[in-house]
Amino acid sequence: MENKKFNLKQFVIITLITSVWIHIGETARAMFVAFPLMESFFEGKVQLIGMQQIQLSHALVWGLWDTILTAVLVFILWLCIVVFGNNGKSVLISGTVTAFATIGIFWIANVNSGLGEWGAAFKIFPLAWIELVIGAWIALKLYSRKK
């Protein structure tokens, strides 16, 4: 990235491309790790909507969440690139900050309100962090491309 001026068109394109990875990572983590942990936590307490009962509205909300998550990640990465340069430091910082500011706060709130347990959070968070660091790396490579 040659200049420090924010380019909205470039940001939107990079966010949309990076969101493909985030959608895949979020869906896989939810289906194979989070949902089974949540089902065992809520067993006998509350009926959860399982994958067999999912509706279009659930998919749309989930898609919106993933896109917002990606936009936050790409924007924080852009800020890091401006300050630290186009390098691994920017990737690690943006992935880590985004993970704590989104997934971390989500799980702290869930556990604090009695809707989750720390064991689940400690299993899910590292996977989310890896997903976001990889997403930041993808976005960095897209920002690094010459026009």
Image: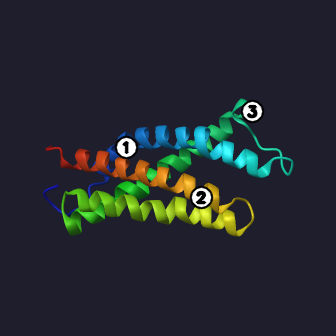
Whether label 3 touches label 1, CB < 8 Å: no
Going by the numbered disc 2, the residue's amino acid type is Ala
Side of 40 where 26 appears, left or right: left
Going by the numbered disc 3, the residue's amino acid type is Gln
Which quadrant of the view contains residue 109?
bottom right
Q: In the image, residue 74 lies at what x, y percent?
A: 35, 54
Q: In the image, residue 44 lies at what x, y percent?
A: 86, 47
Side of 80 where 133 appears, left or right: right
C-alpha span from label 3 to label 2? 24 Å
Q: Of the numbered discs in the image, which one, if any, rests on residue 18?
A: 1
**In front of the other: 55 or 39:** 39
**In front of the other: 144 or 105:** 105
* Residue at mark 2: 121
Q: In the image, residue 132 lies at what x, y percent?
A: 41, 52
Instruction: Give whichever of discs 2 and 1 has the lower sequence position.
Output: 1
* Residue at mark 3: 53
Secondary structure category for the residue under label 3: helix
Instruction: Give whichever of discs 3 and 2 has the lower sequence position.
Output: 3
Going by the numbered disc 1, the residue's amino acid type is Thr
Residue sitting at x 67%, y 39%: 57
C-alpha span from label 3 to label 1? 28 Å
Neighbours of disc 2 within 10 Å: few (<14), some (14-19), many (20+): some
Neighbours of disc 3 within 10 Å: few (<14), some (14-19), many (20+): few
